[in-house]
Image: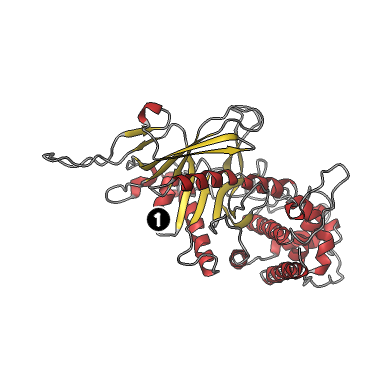
């Protein structure tokens, strides 16, 4: 990196740290130094109180807990600040966003409110579990090529009674509006591509976000059934024109005609990748579930189906076809090639989740209230953002048993964090020195806690006041 580029990158990091401090109206010094302790602690963060022993945290453990309990973080202002930072783009200059949910598991925290049953995958087949916790919906901008870096833009907690599709649509809508306000997207630019994994109702999301300059790409189950448009009306035909055409069963190759576009690409990791696309396909909707409240006729949500097959997968696993649905009804071969590559880049978000949990210690604290969880989550998001801004400024302090990095720009987030302690004195340090104080007296010896914490049930609470009154 040239001296001018390094100075600009250091200025961006210092400016963001100053803006982060201004977003802390209460207990700013304690929360700011707590974030620096996360960035500079030796090794992975294993306990919250252990961060008070880091040299960058000049306050005691009481100030650490007081900052999380009584501090304040202007999250909306932080969202706008993160949206204004430089974003990665693909080769066409397009912004590619990925959306996924990661749980903060709290199975034994009976006094924590709004816990939901979170789906957790096991190592063996059929070993998935539903564990109580706080699910968070993350949205991040993806980069090109093999990398473990993503740009986290937002994190929302999903409540037990929330409609996941509606909440995700509202989250994506707010992010697009912030990107437009920050000048990241301008009229005439390529539409923003939003990638989803299985578990999202991507067709309903396309309906809810139809007025935005976005393209949606999501994985669909292999047992879904879609419909072609109805055939054109012939001369002399009477009666109402059918709304749906022939069926397209993903599990039945006999219902699949020749594709409208196809590509064949040789890859190093997966062998030969073959992608086939069929245009103008839509699901047959019914007045059930989320569509039951929609007045009037149900819409026809047309898109394109893409089938991706590869020769091999890492770990000698048997590759199965992957089906994707794209919100644009007409795609070409070049578009198909761009889409399946963007979907594979979505898995970079899994590396980010692993880094947040295993290294930065996102799910380590045993906080009780939702407000404390929100503050800690955004402190971790801001810590990850600072590492991303410092990725080209730190040196590779590798261990003797680790492989050297051939390119300095290819440092992983963990290696950038290892060198952040040496970079920190060169950036903004707005936190003031702690004042000498004495710890409080605490609870008198022998006294009992008369304010017992309230216990909360897990999942949706279906009991209402009316039912409670009539059943007595």
Residue 76 percent across, percent down from the top left: 58, 66
Q: Quadrant of residue 224?
A: top left
Instruction: Please state which of residues 54 and 108 is positioned toward the viewer in this rendering.
Output: 54
Q: How is the image coloured?
A: secondary structure
Residue that label 1 marks = 210
- Give left or right: position of 440 versus 268: right
* Residue 393 can be seen in this image: yes
Furthest toward the left, the residue is: 236
- Give left or right: position of 468 versus 238: right
Instruction: Please state which of residues 288 and 216 is positioned toward the viewer in this rendering.
Output: 216
Q: Residue at x 54, y 69 (%)?
A: 183
Q: Is residue 322 above or below residue 170?
A: above
Residue 159 percent across, percent down from the top left: 54, 50
Q: Is residue 318 above or below residue 45?
A: above
Q: Residue at x 75, y 60 (%)?
A: 392
- Quadrant housing the N terminus: bottom right
Q: How many marks?
A: 1
Q: Secondary structure at mark 1?
A: loop
Q: Quadrant of residue 391?
A: bottom right
Residue 454 percent across, percent down from the top left: 63, 49
* Residue 457 can be seen in this image: no
Residue 6 percent across, percent down from the top left: 76, 67
- Quadrant housing the C terminus: top left
Instruction: Please state which of residues 166 and 335 is positioned toward the viewer in this rendering.
Output: 335
């Amino acid at each position: 990196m040239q001296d001018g580029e390094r100075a600009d990158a250091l200025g961006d990091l210092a400016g963001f740290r100053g803006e982060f401090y201004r977003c802390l109206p209460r207990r700013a010094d304690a929360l700011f130094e707590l974030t620096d302790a996360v960035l500079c602690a030796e090794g992975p963060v294993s306990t919250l109180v252990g961060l008070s022993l880091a040299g960058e945290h000049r306050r005691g453990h009481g100030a650490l807990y007081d900052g999380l309990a009584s501090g304040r973080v202007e999250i909306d202002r932080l969202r706008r600040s993160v949206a204004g930072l430089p974003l990665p783009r693909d080769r066409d200059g397009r912004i590619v966003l990925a959306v996924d949910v990661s749980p903060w598991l709290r199975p034994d925290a009976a006094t924590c409110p709004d816990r939901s049953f979170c789906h957790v995958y096991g190592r063996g087949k059929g070993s998935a579990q539903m564990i109580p916790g706080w699910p968070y919906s993350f949205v991040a901008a993806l980069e090109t090529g093999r990398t473990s870096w993503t740009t986290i833009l937002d994190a929302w907690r999903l409540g037990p009674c929330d409609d996941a599709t509606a909440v995700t649509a509202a989250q994506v809508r707010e992010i697009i509006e912030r990107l437009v306000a920050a000048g990241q997207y301008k009229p005439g630019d390529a539409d923003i591509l939003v990638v989803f994994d299985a578990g999202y109702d991507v067709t309903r999301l396309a309906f809810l976000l139809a007025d935005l300059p976005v393209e949606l790409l999501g994985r669909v189950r292999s047992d879904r059934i879609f419909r072609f448009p109805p055939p054109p009306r012939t001369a002399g035909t009477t009666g109402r024109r059918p709304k749906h055409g022939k069926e397209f069963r993903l599990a039945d190759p006999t219902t699949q005609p020749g594709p409208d576009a196809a590509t064949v690409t040789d890859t190093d990791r997966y062998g030969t990748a073959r992608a086939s696309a069929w245009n103008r396909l839509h699901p047959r909707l019914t007045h059930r579930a989320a569509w039951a409240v929609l007045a009037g006729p149900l819409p026809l949500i047309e898109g394109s189906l893409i089938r991706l097959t590869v020769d091999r997968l890492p770990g000698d696993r048997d590759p199965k076809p992957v089906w994707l649905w794209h919100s644009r009804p007409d795609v070409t071969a070049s578009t198909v090639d761009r889409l399946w590559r963007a979907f594979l880049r979505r898995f970079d978000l899994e590396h980010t989740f692993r880094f947040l949990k295993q290294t930065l210690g996102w799910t380590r604290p045993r906080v009780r209230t939702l407000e404390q969880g929100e503050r800690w989550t955004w402190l971790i998001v801001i810590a990850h953002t600072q590492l991303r801004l410092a990725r080209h400024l730190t040196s590779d302090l590798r261990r003797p048993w680790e492989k050297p990095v051939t390119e300095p720009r290819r440092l992983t987030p963990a290696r950038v964090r290892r060198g952040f302690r040496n970079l920190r004195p060169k950036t903004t340090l707005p936190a003031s020195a702690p004042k000498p104080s004495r710890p409080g007296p605490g609870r008198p010896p022998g006294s009992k806690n008369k304010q017992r914490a309230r216990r909360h049930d897990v999942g949706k609470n279906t009991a209402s006041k009316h039912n409670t009154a009539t059943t007595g």
